[in-house]
Amino acid sequence: MLKIRAIPGKLLMFLFRQKKKEPPKEGYHSQITAIPYLLAPVIFLALQSVSATIGALDLVVTDLPVPIPIETGRAFHLNLSVLWPLLGSMGASYYFFVEEAQTELYSMKLATAQFWIFILTTTGILLSLMLGQMHGMEYNEAAFPFHFGIAITLILFFYNLLRTYLKTRQRGRITILSILSGAALLLLLYLPNLINYNQPTISEIFRFWVIHLWEELSKELLLLGALAAFLLKTTSLQRAKLEKILFLQLTILIIGAIFATGHHYYWIGMPTVWQWIGGIFSVVQFIGLLLLLYILYLGLAHSNWNKLDYGEKLTFVFIAAGIFYHIMGAAVLGMVIAVPQINRYSSATYLTSAHAHLAVYGAIGMLVLAFSVYALTRKQDLTSKSYFYLCCGFGLNNCGLLIMGTVLTLAGFLQTYLIRVAGLDFQAAQTLIRPYLLLRAGGGATFALGAFLFSTILVYHYCGTTRKHQ
Amino acid sequence: MRKTELYLITILLVSFICFAVLIYYSLMQTTAKMPPAASAGSEIWQKYGCMECHSLLSSGGYAAVDLTKIMSTHTKEELLSFFENPPPLPPHKKRMHVELTEKEAKAMIAFLRYVNNIDTRKWPPEPILNDKRSSSVED
Ligand code: HEM
């Protein structure tokens, strides 16, 4: 690997690698099992953004001929928004866990089996939704056998990581501990959701263990571990320094996220004390985000941009974008709507949608894509041409996301004002915000174009490298 | 076991157990048992994916009005006739709102009644301007 990279054009990079203090890390064989986990999300994203744009048009165009009704279409979209970032986070976890543990994965076979079970289950879920099967679990809309399939993949994921952890000599490293606790929580939080509850309050309580706690705790722990490992690998940031911050970050993340679930319990029939719990711990989450920003700053301050290869550069770009949306969508917008007195008026309006797109795709999705770019360009770096096209795709996609985010925020404010302040009839307000929804569909189309461009180039690049290396 | 491992497991377990205990006590205080008719209605609610368009208890979709307190503003007869002759879904002209059979509609109404009785801490909110108007009338 080093030899290939040392050809004259890449000489600078070779020098950069030589400067590192840690032993050369040219990868572990079992990292290859993580590749499908990081390739599939890119494809799912392209599928999702095209179908979502059609869905967004369906909200504004009279009698648009669409293959599936809006309710199953929305469920299709919401399930995907949970599932592909999950798959990608698991991939990034495997990829960096092995590297940080400095040992091969316990079982590559299990990881591959897990991948295929996941893909089969996801395909099953999407098909059953297209056939109109609904079960009343928003975001996690599936029949029991599919829930069971997901649970199996979570068990395999945790078991594989745990066994790897038990054989490593790097026990106690905070990066792998972060990933391991993320994996344990994924499973633990999912278990109560295997059952469907009729009682609406109980159903809401457990549903948010997946919607809120998966996104803001489990996946974040997985991605935090991966992010730290990436920074340790590509920058000169020192482990001891980073670990101190990570330790604090982990504490804040766990305590903040668990109790901040309260911000989803304000109006579901729980006592008023949850307004205090939810409000206060949302502030704790906010502090955690500032710390994340600081970690990125440290990473950038310790990196030498000119010496990064194209893939690494692009990874940094995605990470930076992810953290930007994390701040805008999750911290700023999220913080505003988490205050109970504001949430009372903003809940269940387009403000939630603005927040969801910026926070779920912007924060989690972008990080997953960052690691997809990274892992898929390790065998061979991008050519300057594909780097250029990927940057274009990234740019278009971000323009689309920003248009959607802005327009949805405006629509949300307007909707909140019209319905919750002025007391206008719901459908009358809906008619007034329709122009914004049309613009949102335009944002969606831009988003989809960008997503399609970078998915195609990335998949094409990866397929090209595997052919060459065979 | 190493210190870092012990520390992590401790904060995870302590936070999570406190959280679960808090939820348990909250539920003991607040939730009323569901009558079987409401349970049946809940299943219909889930089967038709009503929450993809309507919000209930503040979460769900926002293509249509929140249904948490619908039974405070509508009579049983109004809803029965709504479910039996549903209107088109704006902005569409041909696509209709979900239709329910009389039996389904009755179960749905029982469910919505049950939800109506949940103390949602004043969710959905009264419009602020209406609130002022009505309170100034009382003064
Ligand atoms: C082409 C891009 C996209 C378009 C046009 C789009 C469109 C939509 C539409 C129409 C809805 C239904 C509710 C509403 O009207 O807002 C929605 C909801 C949602 N979307 Fe997207 N979406 C896109 C991309 C994504 C991506 C990439 C993700 C995450 C991975 C995502 C996550 C969500 C979530 C979490 C919701 C639920 C919001 C809520 O209930 O508050 N979307 N989206």
Image (cartoon, coloured by chain):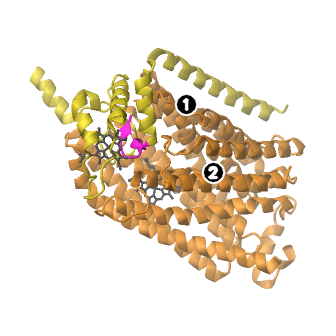
Start-end of magenta stretch: B48-56
Q: In which quarter of the image is residue A416?
A: top left
Question: Would you say A136 lies left or right of A422 here?
Answer: right
The three-letter code of the residue at mark 2 reads Leu
At horizontal 78% and vertical 35% (from top left) the residue drawn is: B4
Q: Is residue A396 visible?
A: no
The three-letter code of the residue at mark 1 reads Phe
At horizontal 67% and vertical 64% (from top left) the residue drawn is: A39
Question: Would you say A277 lies left or right of A9 here?
Answer: left
Whichever of callouts 2 and 1 sits on the residue coming sooner in the sequence is 2
At horizontal 54% and vertical 44% (from top left) the residue drawn is: A140
Can you give x and y, in whole percent of width and height, for residue A289 in the image?
A: 55, 45
Neighbourhood count class around disc 1 (C-alpha, 10 Å): few under 14, some 14–19, many 20 upward? many
Label 2 belongs to which residue?
Answer: A86
Chain B: give its colour: yellow
Quarter placement of the N terminus of chain A: bottom right
Can you give x and y, in whole percent of width and height, for residue A30 in the image?
A: 83, 59
Q: Tag 2, which chain? A: A
Q: Can residue B101 be seen in this view?
A: yes
Q: In which quarter of the image is residue A206?
A: top right
Chain A: give its colour: orange
In this rendering, the answer to whether A398 lies above or below A274 is below
Give the camera-side residue of B3 and A28: A28
Give the camera-side residue of B85 and A128: B85
Label 1 belongs to which residue?
Answer: A259
Neighbourhood count class around disc 2 (C-alpha, 10 Å): few under 14, some 14–19, many 20 upward? many
Can you give x and y, in whole percent of width and height, for residue A163 in the image?
A: 85, 43
